[in-house]
Structures are given as C-alpha cells and as structure tokens.
Amino acid sequence: MLDYFMVINDLKVDYNKLDQTYNNIKWNKQKTLLYVNPLKSPVKKERDKQTLTWMQDDFWIHKPSPEDYEYKLVIDFCKQYGVYEFLSRNTINGNVLGPTWCRYGAKTRLGIHKDYSAVVSNGQSRGCWLAICYKGSQPLEWYDDDKNKVGEVTYTVLLSNALKFHLADIMNTGEERILIRTTFDQPYEVIRDRILKLK
Ligand SMILES: [Fe+2]
C-alpha cells in the first residue's frame, strides 16, 4: 500500500494540547471550492456542480498561527525528516503554508475522489498531504483507477497520495471528521522516499 499511503508513527501527537486549540477555534466556512468529482477530470467545466454545493455547505477551515502547538509539531517533523523545503508555499509571498485544520461536517457529501483541488487551486501543491486525524472514526479507504477497493487505513498521522482515489465516508456514517492537514509541493513519492530514508 506504500503507493497509496504511509502511516507515520514517528510523529507523536499530544491530543490534550490539540484539544486546547480545538476549543478556541473560530471556524471559517470554506467558500473556496473543493473539486472532488470522482469521475471527471479536473477541468472546470466538467466538474459536478452538485458535489461542489454539498462540499460548500459544510466544510470549514482554521489556520493555526506559527506559535500554536500543532503548527510547531508539523514543522518540526518536516525539518527532522528533510521535507521542510517541500512544504507548499503561498504563491504570493512565498511563505510556508503549514498545517490547516479541516472540518468536514456531518452534512458533507463526498464520494470516492482524487484531490484535484490540491493540484488545481494551488499551483504549488501536488496532491500529497500529511494529515493528523483529530476526530472521525471512519477509515480512509483507497481505490485503484477502476475504483476497486484496494485497502483502508485508520490513522493518527498519515502521508497520503491523494492523486489515488480515496474516501473517508462521511456521507454514509454521518460522522463529522476533523483533520489537521499539510500539503507539499512535490509528489507523494518524493516526500515518502525522503521520510523513509531518514527513518
Ligand atoms: Fe481527498
């Protein structure tokens, strides 16, 4: 399954500290569309409007500040494992974007998809992300290009090849899911191999 994801056990997460941040978060409803249509190409005109609307209804984000525990946790890990230089950067000022809290509310309607958005909406991201799972018991399911299920993983910290089909099934479980996600500007394989080398 290493083509799809890599569980990261070396990043120890203090959930009591995350709770402190979580309790003070002021969520921002994400208006920027996530292009999640599982069957269509990332070409805008082919995107499924209904899916986009569903996502808009119940997707929220929060950007931690560099002083926050989870920001430092992720940045320190990336430095330690030689992938800091590959973190996605703001296309305007070049600053490292760092982690983002992502809340997929219980009303999220999301099917099997690839994270085209990471490629399309941010020119410096390549569909590879590191996620800390804060809330949500759904496994992350993985599918091949014919949409046959090839595996699933329940994780605390995961490096994902989001250009492979995947799904955390919020639609059918009705359970809110919250991740702290960080994207990279290099393909999954590059980040994975760098981390493996320094493990
Ligand atoms: Fe995704």
Image (tube, rainbow, N blue to C red):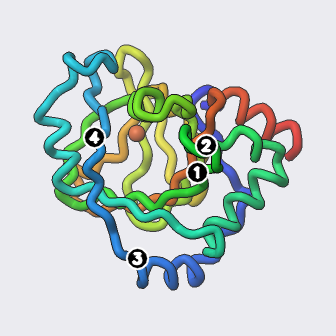
Q: Confirm whether residue 161 shows in the render.
A: no
Q: Quarter of the image holding residue 94? A: top right
Q: Give the number of the disc on residue 25.
A: 3
- Asked if residue 115 is positioned above or below residue 139 in the image, the reply reads above
| Amino acid bearing label 4 | Leu
Which of disc 4 and disc 1 is earlier in sequence? 4
Residue 106 in the image, given as x and y percentages of width and height: 22, 60
Can you tell me whether the CB of the residue at mark 4 lies under 8 Å from the nearest atom of ligand 1?
no
Q: Residue at x 50, y 79 (%)?
A: 21
Which of disc 4 and disc 3 is earlier in sequence? 3
Q: Which residue in the structure is indicated by mark 1?
A: 97
Q: Residue at x 61, y 26 (%)?
A: 3
Callout 3 secondary element: loop
Callout 4 secondary element: loop
Q: CA distance from mark 4 to mark 2?
A: 19 Å
**How many marks do you count on the picture?**
4
Left or right of 39, for residue 149? right
Q: Residues within 10 Å of mark 4 (few under 14, many from 20)?
A: some
Q: Which residue in the structure is indicated by mark 4?
A: 33
Callout 1 secondary element: loop
Labelled pair 3, 2 in contact (Cβ < 8 Å) = no
Q: Give the number of the disc on residue 89.
A: 2
- Asked if residue 104 is positioned above or below residue 13 in the image, the reply reads above
Q: CA distance from mark 1 to mark 2?
A: 5 Å
